[in-house]
């Protein structure tokens, strides 16, 4: 967690200041802060906007009773294969530790897109001994809130690099990029493209770096036009694959940095009448169930999501007991799972 002297010592605006800013009474502002329902929607909206605008941080309830056998898990969604793998890992580790888990799908947001503070206050009221986050990222105000309330938390596979001191668990993305590219090189491919996620994401940067490192080690020239970024969905990846196929010298193989994006790559190749792996070899990343369902089954780099989630739960238990991990970043190894989407270059 982030611990700074200034965060601990600096006093923020009082509830009276917030009430004056929102044009309400202090008791009404207090009701909103404490998650009470007997407040008109428009009044609640004004108070929440004032809370966010002024940076109000609710004071910790030092008399609140923590529930040692309860932890929270917050995921970005409940209807994806990756979230299912995370849930499986947390559930198994929690069972071994004798813990109960409360699962929430993302942090609720206001109509203006700001995080809904009521959810965080409910976390305090619930008395959870810690939180696991499997989200794209948290806002700085959320990090501050968690620190101020002294709630231990661990990030599972964070998309962007968290602030210094925040404990996280992820995969060895750089090595995974190396492994995927070396596999294609071993099959005789030299015109190897990569379709990665957004530029700002940690995993994309690391996987591309591994891809480039493998090319350099093999003495293969890096082609900037072979590096494409997508939005981590099928449609965006399909467009990027079309762009690669339209190059004067298209690739013979492509490393796709997420299995979900590989679905779009398969569609783009089918549109052009190209067969896998005869006309194009494809390697994915994640080893989600979808990788086995594709035709041909996708060769991919296995990211151990369930193991990452279980590791995060065990770290959280240690932190709840006051044991600080030696390192804030834990990385689990990846491995190549060979199936039928790659073949020797012709």
Image (tube, rainbow, N blue to C red):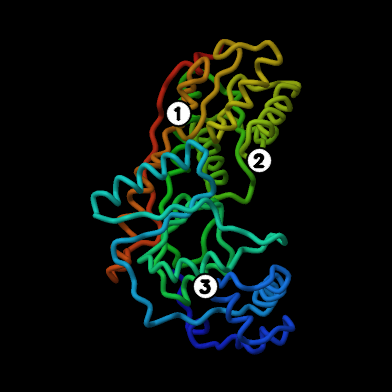
The residue at the point 61 percent across, 85 percent down is 27
Quadrant location, the N terminus: bottom left
Closer mark to the observer between disc 1 and disc 2: 1
Kindly report the distance in space between the C-alpha atoms of the residues bearing marks 3 and 1.
Answer: 36 Å
- Residue under label 2: 231
Badge 2 element: loop
- In the image, 274 versus 310, the foreground residue is 310
Q: Residues within 10 Å of mark 2 (few under 14, many from 20)?
A: some
The quarter holding residue 64 reads bottom left
Percent position of residue 122, x then y: 49, 67
Above or below, 312 against 280 in this view is below
Percent position of residue 333, x then y: 37, 41
Count the labels in the image. 3
Badge 1 element: helix
- In the image, 190 versus 31, the foreground residue is 31
- Residue under label 3: 145
């Amino acid at each position: 967690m982030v611990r700074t002297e200034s965060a601990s010592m600096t006093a923020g605006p009082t509830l009276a200041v917030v009430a004056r800013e929102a044009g309400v009474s202090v008791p009404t502002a207090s009701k909103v802060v404490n998650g009470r329902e007997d407040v008109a929607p428009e009044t609640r909206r004004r108070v929440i906007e004032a809370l966010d605008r002024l940076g109000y941080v609710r004071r910790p309830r030092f008399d609140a009773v923590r529930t040692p056998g309860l932890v929270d898990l917050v995921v970005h969604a409940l209807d994806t294969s990756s979230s299912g793998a995370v849930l499986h890992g947390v559930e198994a580790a929690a069972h071994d530790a004798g813990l109960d888990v409360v699962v929430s799908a993302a942090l609720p947001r206001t109509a203006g897109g700001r995080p809904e503070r009521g959810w965080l206050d409910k976390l305090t009221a619930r008395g959870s001994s810690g939180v696991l986050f499997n989200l794209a990222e948290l806002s700085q105000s959320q990090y501050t809130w968690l620190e101020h309330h002294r709630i231990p938390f661990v990030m599972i596979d964070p998309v962007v690099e968290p602030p210094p001191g925040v404990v996280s668990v992820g995969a060895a993305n750089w090595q995974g990029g190396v492994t995927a590219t070396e596999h294609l090189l071993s099959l005789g491919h030299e015109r190897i493209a990569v379709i990665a996620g957004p530029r700002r994401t940690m995993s994309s940067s690391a996987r591309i770096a591994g891809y480039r490192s493998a090319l350099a080690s093999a003495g293969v020239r890096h082609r900037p036009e072979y590096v494409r970024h997508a939005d981590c969905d099928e449609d965006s990846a399909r467009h990027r694959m079309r762009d690669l196929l339209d190059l004067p010298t298209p690739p013979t193989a492509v490393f796709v940095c997420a299995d979900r994006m590989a679905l779009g790559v398969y569609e783009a190749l089918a549109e052009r009448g190209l067969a896998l792996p005869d006309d194009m070899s494809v390697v994915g990343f994640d080893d989600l169930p979808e990788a086995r369902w594709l035709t041909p089954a996708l060769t991919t780099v296995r990211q151990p999501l369930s193991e990452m989630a279980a590791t995060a739960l065990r770290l959280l238990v240690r932190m709840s007991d006051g044991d600080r991990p030696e390192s804030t970043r834990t990385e689990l190894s990846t491995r190549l799972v060979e199936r039928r989407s790659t073949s020797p270059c012709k």
